[in-house]
Amino acid sequence: MLSVILPSYNEEKMIAVATARMAEILGGAGIDYELLFVDDGSKDGTWAEITRCAADDPHVVGVHFSRNFGKESAMFAGLETAKGDCCVVIDCDLQHPPEKIVEMYRLWEQGYEVVEGIKADRGEESGFHKFAANSFYSLISKATGMDMASSSDFKLLDRKVVDTLNSLPERNVFFRALSFWVGYKKTEVSYCVQERTAGESKWSTKALIKYAITNISSFSSAPLHIVTVLGFVTLAVALVFGIISLVQKIMGVALGGFTTVILLLLFIGSMLMISLGIIGYYLARIYDEIKGRPRYIISTICGREDTK
């Protein structure tokens, strides 16, 4: 059986649409499937729509969070709840084309354990948002040492891959990078990002920046090394100014240097504050991990007989 995981946040207009599209595509291809909608604490009627679809369609399963925990938590909740021999993660807004699921499934039948959805293009986006997205993927690729320039959350995972991901104990997770990191036999399927048919995008440039900071810090220690680099930069600047001051003193042309002292203090102070901020952010992440709180809290599950 194929489990299709659809993280959902304020997507009441898309639940029925997604259910009908999946039934048409997967049913038409003769694939046994379940649709697993994970309601990430939506504020609209998303859960009511999931419940209604689950009552009408035995393929639909709904998972409802007690509050909003974020998309990463929703994806992992889907992976931990899924019963299928393989799982596909796809956006509920169907900007990931569901037609590609059949192609992914056929590749899985050929023995591939991870089928990665690779973006051929990013669809309609503003120039600034596209620049921000490309910058993020460039940073995360360099930080993790893996080429994630065209990567996405749209992918199929074999049951053994799902079990491996579910066994990871960390709380701050980055699904896209972790599914790269675990390895296994991989292949790719390219797709074009589709336009929404209903609802509004939940992503903004501000959200993307927050997403970048959170995931880079959760999967890479590279920002901590920036502290060391800043230290050497500060040392180099201090040596240059020290040599200049010493030469001026020996030559008897030393100036008062008030402006230089102020600039040096501001520069060094800024470097120290940036360094402390980076270290503090990592300490906060360590603190979150040590507390050991769950990634999410499920308040209700509907649509599957063995969970009622």
Image (cartoon, rainbow, N blue to C red):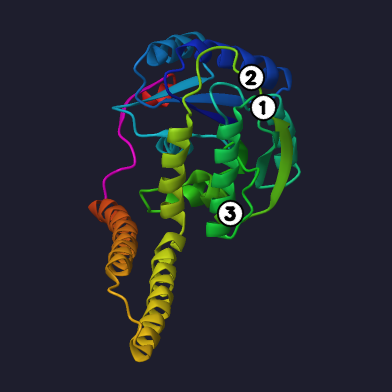
Residue 126: image x %, image y %? 59, 27
Which amino acid lies under the numbered mark 1 shown in the image of this protein? Answer: Gly
Kind of element beneath mark 2: loop
- Residue at the image point whose x is 41% and y is 81% from the top: 244
Is residue 296 rendered magenta in the image? Answer: yes
Residue 5: image x %, image y %? 52, 30
300 to the left or right of 150 = left
Q: Is residue 182 visible?
A: no
Kind of element beneath mark 1: loop
- Residue at the image point whose x is 45% and y is 13% from the top: 12
- Provide the residue designation for mark 1: 123
Q: Which residues are magenta?
A: 292-302
The one of 29 and 267 positioned closer to us in this rendering: 267
Which amino acid lies under the numbered mark 2 shown in the image of this protein? Answer: Glu
Q: Give the spatial CA distance, label 3 vs label 1.
A: 21 Å
Q: Examine the rendered structure and indicate whether residue 22 appears above or below residue 145.
A: above
Which of the two discs, 2 and 1, labels the residue nearer the N terminus? 1
The one of 229 and 51 positioned closer to us in this rendering: 229
Q: Examine the rendered structure and indicate whether residue 82 appears above or below residue 179.
A: above
Kind of element beneath mark 3: helix
- Provide the residue designation for mark 2: 195
**Few, some or many residues within 10 Å of mark 2 (<14, 14–19, 20+):** few
Which amino acid lies under the numbered mark 3 shown in the image of this protein? Answer: Ser
Q: How many marks?
A: 3
